Image (spheres, helix red, strand yellow):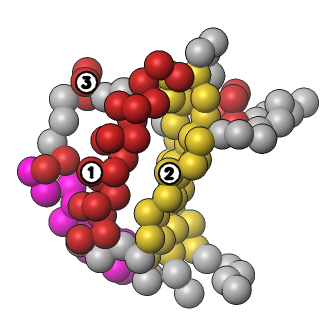
Amino acid sequence: MTYVDGFVVPIPNDRVADYKKMARRAGKIWMEHGALSYFECMGDDVPAGKTTDFFRAVKIKDGETPWFSFIVYKSKRDRDAIAKKVMADPRLKMDFKDMPFDGKRMIYGGFKTMVEM
């Protein structure tokens, strides 16, 4: 079964072009290092929940949209090896102040695939 890293990120609506540019560069690097697929998905039909939701999870502010992103790998072992290479890749070195989103409000995690069709 595959392994997936998932992320939810609050993207300011006026920084979408900047984020997409950064995501394309990052995705290319993840794929070069062995990821099976890389997705960046902008919230479109995201309901507000009564207890929790994507908006609360990343403390969305006015003028922001939640994005759900995920990277698919052959296995957790592959993910660990690929992530190590990606983090060492100088093409991804960025000053966190220049990021097109507030990284402190990003949520992420690694997930074991349990059903795959």
Judged from the image, the secondary structure of the residue bearing numbered disc 2 is strand
Amino acid at pointer 1: Arg
Of residues 61 and 63, the one nearer the viewer is 63
Cα–Cα span, label 1 and label 3: 15 Å
- The residue sitting at 34% across, 79% down in the picture is 78
- Magenta segment boundaries in residue numbering: 76-90
Examine the rendered structure and indicate whether residue 101 appears above or below residue 67: above
Residue 87: % across, % down: 21, 55
Q: Residues within 10 Å of mark 2 (few under 14, many from 20)?
A: some
Q: Which residue is mark 3?
A: 98
* Identity of the residue drawn at 32% across and 41% down: 21
Query: How far apart, in angstroms, are the residues tagged by discs 3 and 2?
Result: 19 Å
Q: Nearer the viewer, residue 27 or 71?
A: 27
Upstream in the sequence, badge 1 or badge 2?
Answer: 1
Say if the magenta span includes residue 69.
no
Residue 101 seen from this side: no
> Which numbered tag is attached to residue 40?
2
| Residue 77 at least partly seen | yes
Q: Vertical placement of 85 versus 22: above or below?
A: below
Q: Nearer the viewer, mark 1 or mark 3?
A: 1
Q: Amino acid at mark 2?
A: Glu
Q: What residue does disc 1 label?
A: 25
